[in-house]
Image (spheres, rainbow, N blue to C red):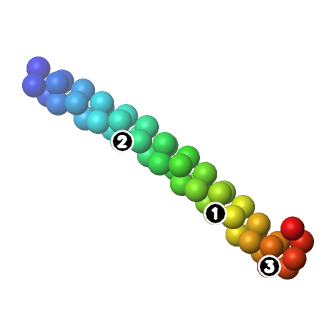
Amino acid sequence: MLLKVKNRKVKISKSIIFSYQRKIEKLYAERIRIYNLYNYENRLKNEGYS
């Protein structure tokens, strides 16, 4: 009985951690994309295109 409860808690915490990891990875990818766009725009400005 006690083992089952413990296993369920472990499964729940694993799924929570996994979903958070996915969210963090998405946010990180978005940040990198924005950062790259920002750098690209600055490079264009420096070269006098815009």
Q: Position of residue 27 (x, y in %)?
A: 53, 49
Nearer to me, 16 or 4: 16
- Which corner quadrant of the image does residue 34 belong to? bottom right
Residue type at tag 1: Tyr
Of labels 3 and 1, earlier in sequence is 1
Mark 2–mark 3 distance (CA, rounded to whole Å): 43 Å
Note whether 12 is above or below 26 in the view shown.
Answer: above
Q: Which disc, if any, is residue 46?
A: 3
Q: Choose mark 2 or mark 1, whichever is in front.
A: 1
Note whether 50 is above or below 30 in the view shown.
Answer: below
Q: Position of residue 23 (x, y in %)?
A: 48, 42
Note whether 47 is above or below 33 in the view shown.
Answer: below
Q: Residue furthest top?
A: 1
- Which corner quadrant of the image does residue 50 belong to? bottom right
Q: Which disc, if any, is residue 17?
A: 2
Which residue carries the number 1 mark? 35
Residue type at tag 3: Asn
Q: Which disc, if any, is residue 49?
A: none
Q: Given contact means CB atoms under 8 Å apart, are the residues at marks 2 and 3 in contact?
A: no
